Amino acid sequence: MNEKSPQRPFCSPRCKLIDLGDWADEKHAISGNSVEEAPWSDDLENY
């Protein structure tokens, strides 16, 4: 924790809650393959 910015990486607890709400509402996402497109999903059918 940085004494100059105790809420880092957020500017305040309010901003932190707003960002968390955006993730919960799926307004943010990490790019990548969806679960259905996972490269290993076809391998499981062969066993």
Image: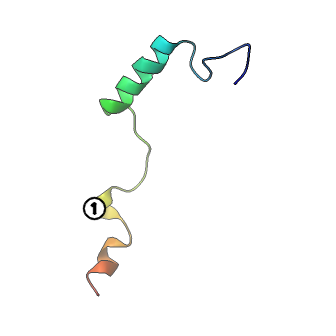
Q: What colour scheme has been applied to the protein in the rendered image?
A: rainbow
Q: Residue drawn 60% across and 24% down?
A: 9
Q: Which residue is mark 1?
A: 36
45 vs 8: above or below = below
Image quadrant holding the N terminus, namely top right
Q: Amino acid at mark 1?
A: Glu
32 vs 38: above or below = above
Q: Residues within 10 Å of mark 1 (few under 14, many from 20)?
A: few
Q: Residue drawn 74% across and 15% down?
A: 3
Which of 15/27 is in front?
15
Image quadrant holding the C terminus, namely bottom left
Disc 1 is placed on an element classified as helix
Image coordinates for residue 20, horizontal then vertical, percent: 41, 26
**36 horizontally vs 40: left or right:** left
Q: Residue drawn 31% across and 59% down?
A: 35
Q: Give the image quarter of residue 8.
A: top right
Image coordinates for residue 36, horizontal then vertical, percent: 28, 61
Image coordinates for residue 30, horizontal then vertical, percent: 44, 43
Name the outermost residue toward the right.
Answer: 3
13 vs 9: above or below = above
Image coordinates for residue 24, horizontal then vertical, percent: 33, 31
Q: Give the image quarter of residue 27.
A: top left
**29 horizontally vs 7: left or right:** left
6 vs 47: above or below = above
